[in-house]
């Protein structure tokens, strides 16, 4: 190696005119160079790119942009293993359930920090529009990295919502995007995004949108009795599904030589009607709901010294919800709840062995991490005999990861410490809930049999629990402070194969297959209490076993030099059995709303500025109750969606800009048609979904 270096330096010296003119000087210079650079051989190495131990399902780029979606929940339908609970309409509540473990077992993270709801534990994904989202990522188990807050270890599955970060082409200091969406149900949805480069290392982002829809749509409702007779078959208009909502976000993003930081403020406010279930020949409802969600959050990540990194997260949120039922023939209800949350987290990572670690090594990377979180929650409500609960949660996680040739492994243990307090004890709830400390482990392993082939075998085990929510414990005349946590145990084994080619028509192929077995113990359910229709009690009565298989496949084809075709498909099989009580008719039955078979397929065709997208969703037969009898059977449903979009330049670049990146203003046009075959279906019994509907989009980008 030293002779090659001398030869290269000799050529550099020889091409300088002064040295060539004086040979004796050149000889002296060469002797000096030889003396200075006669060193031992040096081997240049780098840390191997860290692939996730457990792969992630992602929607990003052209595939995400091409889906006909209005909210995050609409996009999440295309992940395998996901079931959506959709109550219909633009403003209808939408939650997701991953691998049948329950909505409360899914952690939803917005720009790296969890969206909390201590009141009922669920996150309405229908509130989050896709206007400013650049990536959705779904992890089973937990996120496949150890440098993260303790919160990230605390769920059976996690959904990460990543908003757009400012990016500037050469010569630009700002970006501006103005979008207008309009469609059926009276939808009007203007939005704006502005990004400014304040300095080379500090960027500003501000966005806002307004959504209005009257929410009325025609539907056909047909009820068939177990005997086969038709009880009714009618066409009606869905009422009281209107929504008005506004969202505003402001973010600052900073970049440091060995780190980065960001601060984000978020505000959302809405008023919407709740159409309700169609039962007892009642076709309209008058219930309404007002929501206000606001938070400020920040993240700071820094390389402190060689092999040691630190991360700090903080958040304050203030959420208010008002629910009104003015119908006195049922029960007049006007409830208002306000919840506050303070969250602080610090995580440390130490690279013990590896190129960037304390001990250099070329084949082994070994990291350890320690993180600690503190979270405070308080709930205020106008209920009679309300106890005003307060909760302090301390989380501590220790984790390690090892990358060694063909083997990648991660292990972690999470300690959870809960301290509840009530401010106004009552006869029904004289003391606060007491929870013993919990320690829950997880182990993830990935093995690559052939180093040069992207074939991976993987497996993981994780045990986790979810705490009873404030509603479970303290809701007036419903809560039960004797509840136990709801535990889940997950086992997973799978295989993944990825292949990319630089040449040829087929550019990439990816196949992922996972089999899993989950157990949910001490499942929290509501059961009737006494004879009153509105009197319920929360109890630990459930035990569920879930066996399933997820399959994901995708390929990218370069049909010509200008046409790119991407095809992706997902399939899920699940057998989710209620094994609570052998004496009940529900024993061994498929749990409510979980189909045995479900899947999706997407096709994206790109040609110059034209994009054509097709999407298919299928949900197989299922039951709306764990008693799998004909009266509870639900027919399969499926939808076909299509969108066409075109991007065009408003003006060509000037000669002065010819050496810069393309920064000319652009116009984006799109037309979306959903449920093209006008299928009439319910996701949730008695909540009819819209038939064929559409939307038009115009976006100006400067």
Image (spheres, rainbow, N blue to C red):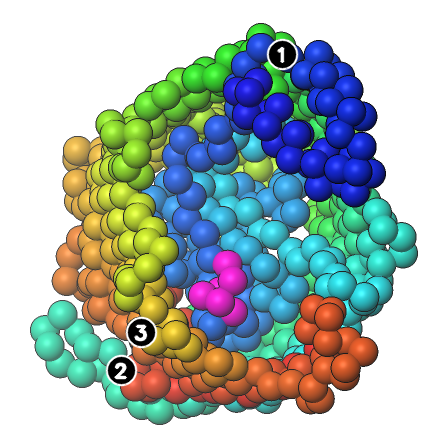
Q: CA distance from mark 2 to mark 3?
A: 46 Å
Q: Is residue 343 visible?
A: no
- Which quarter of the figure has residue 542? top left
Q: Main secondary structure of the magenta part?
A: helix
Residue at the location (17% across, 33% down)? 582
Secondary structure of residue under mark 3: loop
Secondary structure of residue under mark 1: loop
Q: Nearer the viewer, mark 2 or mark 3?
A: 3
Residue at the location (30% across, 34% down)? 452
Is 61 colored magenta in this rendering?
A: yes
Q: CA distance from mark 2 to mark 1?
A: 85 Å
Depth check: give the residue in front, 26 or 76. 26
Secondary structure of residue under mark 2: strand
| Disc marking residue 222 | 2
Is 151 colored magenta in this rendering?
A: no
> What residue is shown with label 3?
559
> What residue is shown with label 1?
39
Q: Is residue 68 visible?
A: yes
Q: Are marks 3 and 1 in contact (CB under 8 Å)?
A: no
Q: Earlier in the sequence, mark 2 or mark 3?
A: 2
Residue at the location (74% across, 51% down)? 319
The count of marks equals: 3
Horizontal and vertical percent for residue 699? Answer: 65, 82
Magenta residue span: 60-65
């Amino acid at each position: 190696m030293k002779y090659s270096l001398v030869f290269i330096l000799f050529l550099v010296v020889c091409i300088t005119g002064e040295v060539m003119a004086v040979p004796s000087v050149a000889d002296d210079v060469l002797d000096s160079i030889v003396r200075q650079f006669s060193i031992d051989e040096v081997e240049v190495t780098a840390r191997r790119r860290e692939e996730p131990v457990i792969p992630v399902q992602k929607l990003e780029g052209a595939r995400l942009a091409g889906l006909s979606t209005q909210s995050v929940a609409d996009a999440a339908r295309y992940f395998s293993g996901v079931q959506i609970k959709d109550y219909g309409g633009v403003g209808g509540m939408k939650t997701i359930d991953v691998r049948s473990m329950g909505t409360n077992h899914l952690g939803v993270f917005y720009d790296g920090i969890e969206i909390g709801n201590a009141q009922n534990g669920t996150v309405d994904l229908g509130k989050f529009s896709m206007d400013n989202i650049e990536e959705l990522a779904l992890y089973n188990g937990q996120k496949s990295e150890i440098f993260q807050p303790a919160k990230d270890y605390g769920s059976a599955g996690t959904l990460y919502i990543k908003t757009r970060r400012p990016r500037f082409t050469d010569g630009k200091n700002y970006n501006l995007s103005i979008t207008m969406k309009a469609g059926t149900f009276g939808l009007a949805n203007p939005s704006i995004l502005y990004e400014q480069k304040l300095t080379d290392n500090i960027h500003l982002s501000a966005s806002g949108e307004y959504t209005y829809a009257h929410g009325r749509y025609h539907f056909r409702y047909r009820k068939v009795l177990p005997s086969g007779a038709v009880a009714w078959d009618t066409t009606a208009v869905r009422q009281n599904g209107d929504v008005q909502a506004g969202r505003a976000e402001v973010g600052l993003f900073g970049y440091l030589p060995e780190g980065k930081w960001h601060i984000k403020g978020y505000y959302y406010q809405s008023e919407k009607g709740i159409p309700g279930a169609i039962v007892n020949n009642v076709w309209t409802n008058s219930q309404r709901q007002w929501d206000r969600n606001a938070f400020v959050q920040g993240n700071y990540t820094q390389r402190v010294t060689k092999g040691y990194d630190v991360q700090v997260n903080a958040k304050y949120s203030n959420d208010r919800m008002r629910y009104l039922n003015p119908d006195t023939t049922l029960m007049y209800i006007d409830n208002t709840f306000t919840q506050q949350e303070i969250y602080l987290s610090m995580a440390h990572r130490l690279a013990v062995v590896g190129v960037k670690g304390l001990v250099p090594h070329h084949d082994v990377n070994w990291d350890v991490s320690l993180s600690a979180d503190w979270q405070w929650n308080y709930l205020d409500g106008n209920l009679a005999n309300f106890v005003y609960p307060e909760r302090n949660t301390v989380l501590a996680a220790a984790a390690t990861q090892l990358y060694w040739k063909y083997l990648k492994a991660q292990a972690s243990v999470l300690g959870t410490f809960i301290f509840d307090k009530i401010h106004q004890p009552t006869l029904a709830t004289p003391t606060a809930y007491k929870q013993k400390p919990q320690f829950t482990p997880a182990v993830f392993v990935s093995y690559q049999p052939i180093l040069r082939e992207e074939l991976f075998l993987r497996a993981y085990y994780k045990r986790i629990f979810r705490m009873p929510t404030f509603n479970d414990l303290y809701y007036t005349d419903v809560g039960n402070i004797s509840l136990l946590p709801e535990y889940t145990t997950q086992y997973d084994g799978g295989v993944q194969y990825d292949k990319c080619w630089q040449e040829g028509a087929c550019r990439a192929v990816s196949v992922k297959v996972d089999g899993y077995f989950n157990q949910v113990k001490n499942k929290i359910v509501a059961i009737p209490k006494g004879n009153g229709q509105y009197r319920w009690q929360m109890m630990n009565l459930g035990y569920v076993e879930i066996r399933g298989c997820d399959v994901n496949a995708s390929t990218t084809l370069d049909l010509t030099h200008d046409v790119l075709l991407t095809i992706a498909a997902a399939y899920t099989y699940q057998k989710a059995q209620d094994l609570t009580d052998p004496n009940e008719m529900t024993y061994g039955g498929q749990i409510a709303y979980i189909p045995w078979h479900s899947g999706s397929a997407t096709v994206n065709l790109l040609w110059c500025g034209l994009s054509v997208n097709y999407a298919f969703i299928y949900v197989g037969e299922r039951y709306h109750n764990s008693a799998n009898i004909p009266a509870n059977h639900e027919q399969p449903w499926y939808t076909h969606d299509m969108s066409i979009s075109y991007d065009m330049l408003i003006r060509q670049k000037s000669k002065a800009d010819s050496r810069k990146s393309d920064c000319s203003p652009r116009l984006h046009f799109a037309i979306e048609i959903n449920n093209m075959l006008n299928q009439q279906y319910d996701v949730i019994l008695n909540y009819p979904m819209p038939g064929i509907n559409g939307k038009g989009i115009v976006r100006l980008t400067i």
